[in-house]
């Protein structure tokens, strides 16, 4: 069976290290082996939580530049903006019509993002997983690389596919598989080792953005929360030390080593050695990406042409799916 990969990131701010390890880096290696790939900048999803629309255009361009800077070749892969393919929202509506409210109420990301005042939460946030299911099935995705926080949404998409295909009495929509990278599946905040690193966290010191300059990276790691104990090489010691665990995992991911190897190399040492070493690795990793992003952002015509080409390719595939969906829903077509 040929493989078709679909994934996306919301342009809700500067992409951060969690987006890199949980999504972008995986995409590059998966794309190498895939037959077809669609990498979307999901601006309509961004609207579910955006407080300020002023930055949306710029953030969308930054995200496009970041995809390319991280190694996603716009010639081999379709890179496009969700709102440039109107079929996403059309299919989302049809899927909404067959989605039980109870399924959406159980989504942990809705509960997290809606907070305590759930009655005031926006409908778009509640139905977000339906739009995400549409993003996936529109392209007949066989595999969907996501961080483990998004796994529930891909499982939701699988449930919807089953309901739709049962209703249509045909395999109209393809069943997607989530692809979760185990190590680095969830990078934690630098200020709280129990929270995930996030673009929209109120504190910029909670994350490393892929556009942070070297001094800022060094400062953020210097200020990263730690605990008062020395580091030991015993992996079990990480169980109740989430901030240490996060720094060790980051170090291991950047060096392509196991967590145990990194922990052993800092056995008996204090946090400052670990932080200095981590800072060097981060600078080596992030600075070429940052420079490439800046170069690409200075060539808006090139970025626009990549996004136009990506949208053209995406529209062709999406239109074919929609034709089948409309037929199976018995909508009048003239
Ligand atoms: N901390 C993380 N660790 C691992 N993976 C992460 N991802 C995000 N944060 C981490 C992965 O990045 C992909 C796209 O993310 P998104 O921007 O569409 O949504 P998100 O998960 O809500 O990311 P953010 O940065 O936290 O955005 P905001 O602040 O806007 O909500 C997904 O594959 C996700 O797993």
Image: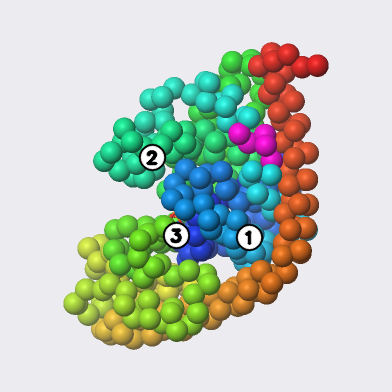
Q: Residue at image x 69%, y 44%?
A: 84
Q: Is residue 233 left or right of residue 130?
A: left
Residues at discs 3 and 2 in contact (Cβ within 8 Å) = no
Question: Tag 3: Cα neighbours inside 10 Å, few (<14), some, or many (≥20)?
Answer: many
Which range is magenta? 85-89
The residue that disc 3 covers is 199
Is disc 3 placed on a helix, strand or loop? Answer: loop
Q: Is mark 3 within 8 Å of ligand 1?
A: yes
Residue 207 location, quadrant: bottom left
Most distant residue in the right direction: 334
User: Which residue is farthest front?
Assistant: 54
Q: Nearer the viewer, residue 157 or 50?
A: 50
Query: Element under label 1?
Result: helix
The quadrant of the picture occupied by the C terminus is top right
| Image-based side of 17 in relation to 34, left or right | left
Depicted 64 relative to depicted 292: above or below: above
């Amino acid at each position: 069976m040929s493989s078709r990969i679909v994934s996306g990131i919301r342009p809700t701010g500067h992409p951060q290290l969690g987006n890199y390890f949980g999504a972008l880096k995986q995409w590059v290696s998966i794309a190498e082996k895939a037959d077809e790939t669609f990498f979307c900048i999901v601006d309509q999803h961004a609207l579910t939580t955006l407080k300020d629309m002023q930055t949306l255009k710029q953030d969308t361009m930054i995200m496009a530049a970041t995809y390319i800077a991280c190694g996603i070749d716009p010639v081999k892969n379709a890179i496009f903006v969700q709102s440039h393919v109107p079929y996403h929202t059309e299919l989302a509506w049809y899927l909404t019509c067959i989605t039980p409210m109870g399924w959406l109420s159980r989504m942990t990301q809705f509960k997290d993002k809606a907070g305590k005042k759930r009655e005031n939460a926006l409908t778009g946030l509640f139905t977000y997983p339906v739009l995400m299911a549409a993003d996936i099935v529109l392209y007949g995705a066989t595999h969907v690389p996501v961080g483990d926080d998004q796994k529930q949404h891909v499982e939701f998409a699988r449930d919807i596919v089953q309901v739709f295909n049962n209703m249509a009495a045909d395999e109209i929509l393809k069943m997607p598989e989530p692809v979760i990278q185990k190590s680095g599946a969830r990078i934690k905040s630098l200020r709280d080792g129990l929270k995930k690193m996030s673009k929209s966290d109120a504190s910029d010191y909670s994350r490393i953005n892929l556009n942070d300059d070297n001094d800022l990276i060094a400062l953020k790691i210097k200020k990263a929360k730690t605990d008062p104990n020395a580091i030991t090489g015993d992996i079990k010691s990480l169980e109740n030390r989430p901030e240490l665990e996060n720094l060790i995992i980051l170090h291991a991911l950047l060096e392509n080593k196991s967590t145990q190897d990194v922990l052993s190399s800092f056995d008996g040492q204090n946090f400052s050695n670990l932080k200095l070493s981590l800072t060097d690795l981060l600078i080596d990793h992030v600075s070429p990406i940052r420079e490439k992003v800046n170069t690409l952002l200075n060539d808006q015509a090139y970025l626009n042409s990549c996004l136009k080409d990506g949208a053209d390719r995406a529209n062709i595939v999406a239109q074919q799916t929609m034709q089948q969906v409309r037929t199976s829903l018995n909508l009048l077509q003239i």
